[in-house]
Image (tube, helix red, strand yellow):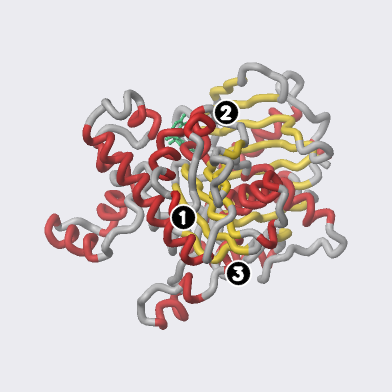
Amino acid sequence: MNILVLNCGSSSIKYQLFDMRDQSVLAKGLVHRVGMSGSKIDHKKAGQSDKTVIQTEILDHKDGIKKILDLLTGEKTGVLKSLDQIDAVGHRIVHGGEKFAASVLIDENVLRAIRDCIVFAPLHNPPNLKGVEAVTEIMPKVRQVGVFDTAFHQTMKPKAFLYGLPYRFYEKDGIRRYGFHGTSHRFVSRRAAELLKKPYEKMKIITVHLGNGCSIAAIDQGVSVDTSMGHTPLEGLVMGTRCGDIDPAISLYLMKKYELSVQEVDNLLNKHSGVLGISQESNDLRDLEEGWPKRSERANLALEVYAYRIRKYIGAYIATLNGCDALVFTAGVGENSPIVRGIVCKDMEFLGIEIDLQKNEVTWRGAEGDISTPNARVRTLVVPTNEELVIAQDTMEIVGSKTGKGKGKV
Ligand code: AMP
């Protein structure tokens, strides 16, 4: 079974084509600047050393997807004889609100429910939907599955997802913690259990996803019980450009003092804060780590704040879980930064976290590893995330199921 995975952003489309017989990637790529000037496609077939770069006008998402399909079936760039060889398409959908607690086969009801969630993710759900609509037009017979960033966290109890606000805002407006990166937290926590050869359903796991966006999740017996991102992906950890937790009164104060509009505060907190805001140097941890700890005081400070927030959440989630069997680092920073992992895990022996500094140094992107000392009570692991593979696996499971129906509640 061949499954195409699509991740449609506002101006980009990421894609991977999987052969699910061995879960291998046949081809993958990225469409840049959809609907803008200077658009292009980076495309790579399995086994090809360099990517093919195609500079071409891409009018909209439908045009982008058409061009991806042309590349997948093209004489030089292709890996398929015809589009009939695509058995199903899996889509990343950012927000499923309270309507989806698992991945689902997309039909008219599901589409309506995803549209209802646009209020929660006005920048993300519309392009996700455009991807679904484009595939429906181009390949009307192909079944499509939606995999939601929020679904894994739908198991949180009200005590974890409610804010201390008047209850009517939850009832009427759906204001609550939803959590994001669910596909990644689900994948790496399961993988950690496999690596440790322990039953997933009996483990207490804390997963730390540190990429462009950062979030941490507490997973008890295979279900998410708490996570740091909230109503939006702005809450929680300090990120590249996002502030994470702040006193909510700060926004009001800044609006008043500097006469900032809602849009300006939104930009400030989402795009100019985090480690970029503190360091005033870069949002990329690679830059801040270059020459560390001698690079600059501000770079050091940004790294310290970044790591300290992670430590606080780990402590909180150990309390939530009443213990922890595995602490899992993943995504760009989590997989690649011994410096961040080192600062986060320093002086945590009381909580059972102790890492071997040598093992911590020698992990590299794409590698899995246990970096804890032999006697540590908590196993600290590095597990590369693979959200596209999860989307492909869910898609295969759902289109292959007898009912043909998804598992989400619509
Ligand atoms: P992701 O969203 O998972 O692709 O992660 C992207 C982020 O990972 C970038 O913003 C970088 O800051 C970070 N990153 C990638 N490679 C490294 C590295 N070698 N060391 C530290 N951070 C890295």
**Horizontal side, residue 274 vs residue 256: left or right:** right
Q: Give how far across and how far down residue 294 sits, in percent.
A: 26, 26
Q: Give how far across and how far down residue 326 sits, in percent.
A: 58, 51
Q: Earlier in the sequence, mark 1 or mark 3?
A: 3
Residue closest to the eye, 342 or 15: 342
Residue at x-position 59% and y-position 68%: 155
Mark 3 and mark 2: Cα distance apart in space = 34 Å
**Horizontal side, residue 390 vs residue 344: left or right:** right
Q: Which residue is mark 2?
A: 41
Q: Which residue is mark 1?
A: 351
Q: Earlier in the sequence, mark 2 or mark 1?
A: 2
Residue at x-position 22% and y-position 61%: 250
Mark 1 and mark 3: Cα distance apart in space = 37 Å
Residue at x-position 50% and y-position 29%: 358
Q: Which residue is mark 3?
A: 99
Q: Earlier in the sequence, mark 3 or mark 2?
A: 2
Residue closest to the eye, 2 or 387: 387
Q: Residues within 10 Å of mark 1 (few under 14, many from 20)?
A: some
Residue 308 appears in view: yes
Q: Is mark 3 within 8 Å of ligand 1?
A: no
Residue type, mark 3 in image: Lys
Where residue 410 sits, quadrant-wise, is: bottom right
Residue type, mark 2 in image: Ile
Residue closest to the eye, 344 or 377: 377
Q: Give how far across and how far down residue 255 sits, in percent.
A: 19, 60
Furthest residue to the left?
A: 257
